[in-house]
Amino acid sequence: MRLILAILFPPLVFFTIWRPFQGLMNAFLWITVIGWPVAAMWAIYALSQYRNDELRREFDYDRGYGRRYRY
């Protein structure tokens, strides 16, 4: 769902992944016709980085590097 949103409305993706300042910069880029493909690619890249960070946090949490520790 976020991938479709990243292609059609790139600035909204940044607000869903808690990056509002990048969302505002992306909105200014998205307004121009020439900048729309660049804004969409930037949103897709940021979304993939967000997913990688989520997986990394989950992995670290399961290994005991997070706030809780397994005994």
Image: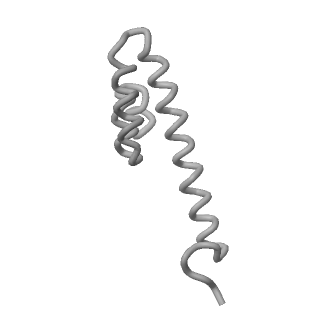
Q: Position of residue 56 (x, y in %)?
A: 62, 58
Task: Name above or below for residue 18 compared with residue 57.
Answer: above
State the residue at coordinates (64%, 73%).
Answer: 65
State the residue at coordinates (45%, 23%).
Answer: 39
Task: Name above or below for residue 46 compared with residue 42.
Answer: below
> Which quarter of the rendered picture does the N terminus lie within?
top left
Number of residue marks: 0
State the residue at coordinates (58%, 73%).
Answer: 66
On the picture, is 30 further left or further right than 41?
Answer: left
State the residue at coordinates (49%, 19%).
Answer: 38
Q: Quadrant of residue 35?
A: top left
Q: Quadrant of residue 16?
A: top left
Foreground residue, 67 or 61? 67
Residue at the far bottom in the pictured view: 71
Q: How is the image coloured?
A: one colour
Residue at the far top in the pictured view: 34
Q: Position of residue 41 (x, y in %)?
A: 51, 25
Foreground residue, 9 or 38? 38
Q: Quadrant of residue 19?
A: top left
Foreground residue, 4 or 52? 52
Q: Position of residue 22 (x, y in %)?
A: 41, 35
Task: Name above or below for residue 31 compared with residue 1.
Answer: above
Task: Name above or below for residue 8 compared with residue 63.
Answer: above
> Which quarter of the rendered picture does the C terminus lie within?
bottom right
On the picture, is 8 further left or further right than 70?
Answer: left
Q: Position of residue 24 (x, y in %)?
A: 34, 32
On the picture, is 59 further left or further right than 17?
Answer: right
